[in-house]
Image: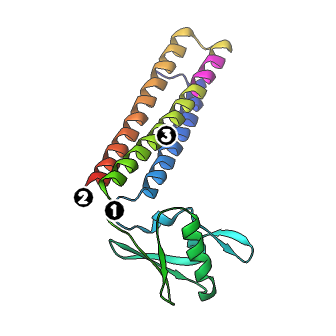
Amino acid sequence: MIDESIKYVFEFMRDAMDQSIKHTQSEYQKLRAGKATPNMLDGVMVEYYGSDVPLNQVSTVSTPDARSLWIQPFEKGIMQDIERAIINANLGYAPQNDGERVIINIPPLTEERRKNLVKTLKQEAEHGKVSLRNARRDAMEEVKKAKKDGLSEDLAKDAEDEIQKVLEEYTTKIDQLTASKEKEIMTI
């Protein structure tokens, strides 16, 4: 039974953990698993009138098939800027300009590249788990403060046990996401 006086701790912790899960998922989406998706170019910044702007704000990114991306700029004058931004992002893509759009052909992944992607995937999973543990640490500190302010020993112990259960629940979610993405990467 969680005491009403520390219920906010759990709400705050779950919010932080939900954010960790969302961040981990967004990082996983950036890892290409052999098929083209528009979000593969998330994070690419294009110089546009003197400032860096996300690619999706100056163009439309589409996937006509599983092996290619089409980037249709809103203004034809920035096609070279888009090509340069993609090359400078070090994503390993070779953009081609056909006069109307920038085209990126996605080559099939080699076995070595798949293994490297899985390593990166596991690093991102560990970052997510560290973030979860940080949220747990913060929640535990709040319980300790509440204990100093008069929360009973039994209620504090129950809260700490519940915090640990929540951490394990979210850790399992990251493990499931990781296993799913690893299977997607390793599938030829």
| Furthest-top residue in this view | 153
Task: Identify the residue at image location x=65%, y=69%.
Answer: 53
Label 2 amino acid?
A: Ile
Say above or below: 8 vs 18. above
Number of residues whose C-alpha sits closer than 10 Å to that of mark 2, classed few (under 14), some (14–19) or many (20 or more):
few
Task: Identify the residue at image location x=42%, y=26%.
Answer: 165
Q: Look at mark 2 in the image and give the residue it sits on.
A: 188
Label 1 amino acid?
A: Gly
Number of residues whose C-alpha sits closer than 10 Å to that of mark 1, classed few (under 14), some (14–19) or many (20 or more):
some
Q: Is residue 145 left or right of residue 38?
A: right
Q: Look at mark 1 in the image and give the residue it sits on.
A: 34
Query: Where's residue 130, x and y in %?
Result: 52, 33
Task: Identify the residue at image location x=46%, y=68%.
Answer: 93
| Furthest-right residue in this view | 50
Label 3 amino acid?
A: Gly
Q: How is the image coloured?
A: rainbow
Query: Where's residue 35, x and y in %?
Result: 34, 65
Q: Earlier in the sequence, mark 2 or mark 1?
A: 1
Q: Secondary structure at mark 1?
A: loop
Q: Which residues are magenta?
A: 139-146
Q: Which dot, 2 or 3, sits closer to the camera?
A: 2
Q: Secondary structure at mark 3?
A: helix
Say above or below: 123 vs 167. below
Residue contact at pointers 2 and 1, CB within 8 angstroms: yes
Query: Where's residue 50, x and y in %?
Result: 75, 74
In three-dimensional space, the C-alpha distance between marks 2 and 3, rounded to whole angstroms, equals: 27 Å
Number of residues whose C-alpha sits closer than 10 Å to that of mark 3, classed few (under 14), some (14–19) or many (20 or more):
many
In three-dimensional space, the C-alpha distance between marks 2 and 1, rounded to whole angstroms, equals: 8 Å
SS assignment for the magenta stretch, majority: helix
Query: Where's residue 145, x and y in %?
Result: 66, 18
